[in-house]
């Protein structure tokens, strides 16, 4: 189940929310989109990028019109990927980017940690969930040690984004993917 855990900066849990509408409402307060999309055709794990995009065309077009996205792609990662640890580490430290980060989980899951103010919003996203990270909002992401997901990514710049690391070690004080998923 998708879950939002709201913490203070020391990692102390302040609130846990599992109702989808309540999560969406709470996240909208910090400018974060949280939506649930349904594919227009039945999808299998093996479907290529074109078919995945076709299945979500209406939603992709709607957000593209609203926010002016310039490009869109589909990425997936499996537990046997040789690069999984390298990729995990890349997103595990707090960073920002000027691009508006948008991810839709076609299947699989991941944990976003958003740090827009003196609180940390831990969002466990699952298949069917779309989440955005507003520009310049400190955040990090954990896919776990055995990642298995497929995501649609939307970009406002053709080159995608470049992460600026904040240099903070805050991510080390927070539970990793495995612990978050266990709670849920
Ligand atoms: Fe990011």
Image: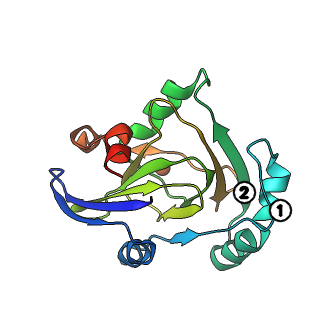
**Residue 101 tag number:** none
The residue located at (73%, 44%) in the rendering is: 45
Farthest residue to the top: give it: 82
23 to 52, vertically: above or below: below
Disc 1 from disc 2: Cα separation: 12 Å
97 to 54, vertically: above or below: above
Mark 2, residue position: 72
The answer to whether residue 134 is left or right of residue 107 is left
Q: For residue 37, which quarter of the picture? A: bottom right
The residue located at (25%, 37%) in the rendering is: 172
Inspect this view and state whether residue 109 appears.
Answer: yes
Q: Earlier in the sequence, mark 1 or mark 2?
A: 1
Question: Foreground mark, 1 or 2?
Answer: 1
Pick the front one: 102 or 17: 17
Inspect this view and state whether residue 100 appears.
Answer: no
Percent x, y for residue 134?
46, 65
The answer to whether residue 170 is left or right of residue 36 is left
Q: Residues within 10 Å of mark 1 (few under 14, many from 20)?
A: few
Pick the front one: 184 or 116: 184
109 to 99, vertically: above or below: above
Percent x, y for residue 119?
23, 62
Mark 1, residue position: 54
Pick the front one: 160 or 171: 171
The answer to whether residue 103 is left or right of residue 56 is left
Question: Does dot 2 land on a helix, a strand or a loop?
Answer: strand
The residue located at (50%, 30%) in the rendering is: 146
Q: For residue 21, which quarter of the picture? A: bottom left
The residue located at (68%, 66%) in the rendering is: 69
């Amino acid at each position: 189940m998708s879950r939002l855990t709201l913490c203070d900066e020391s990692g102390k849990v302040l609130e846990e929310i599992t109702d989808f509408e309540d999560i969406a409402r709470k996240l909208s307060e910090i400018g974060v989109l949280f939506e649930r999309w349904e594919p227009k055709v039945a999808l299998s794990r093996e479907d290529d990028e074109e078919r995945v995009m076709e299945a979500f065309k209406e939603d992709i077009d709607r957000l593209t019109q609203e926010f002016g996205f310039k490009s869109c792609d589909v990425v997936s990662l499996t537990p046997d990927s040789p690069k999984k640890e390298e990729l995990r580490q890349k997103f595990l430290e707090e960073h920002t980017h000027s691009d508006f980060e948008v991810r839709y989980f076609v299947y699989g899951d991941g944990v976003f940690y958003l740090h827009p103010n003196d609180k940390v919003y831990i969002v466990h996203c699952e298949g069917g969930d779309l989440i955005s990270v507003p520009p310049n909002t400190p955040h990090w992401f954990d896919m776990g040690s055995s990642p298995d997901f497929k995501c649609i990514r939307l970009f406002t710049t053709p080159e995608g984004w470049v992460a600026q690391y904040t240099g903070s070690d805050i991510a080390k004080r927070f539970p990793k993917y495995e612990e978050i998923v266990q709670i849920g």
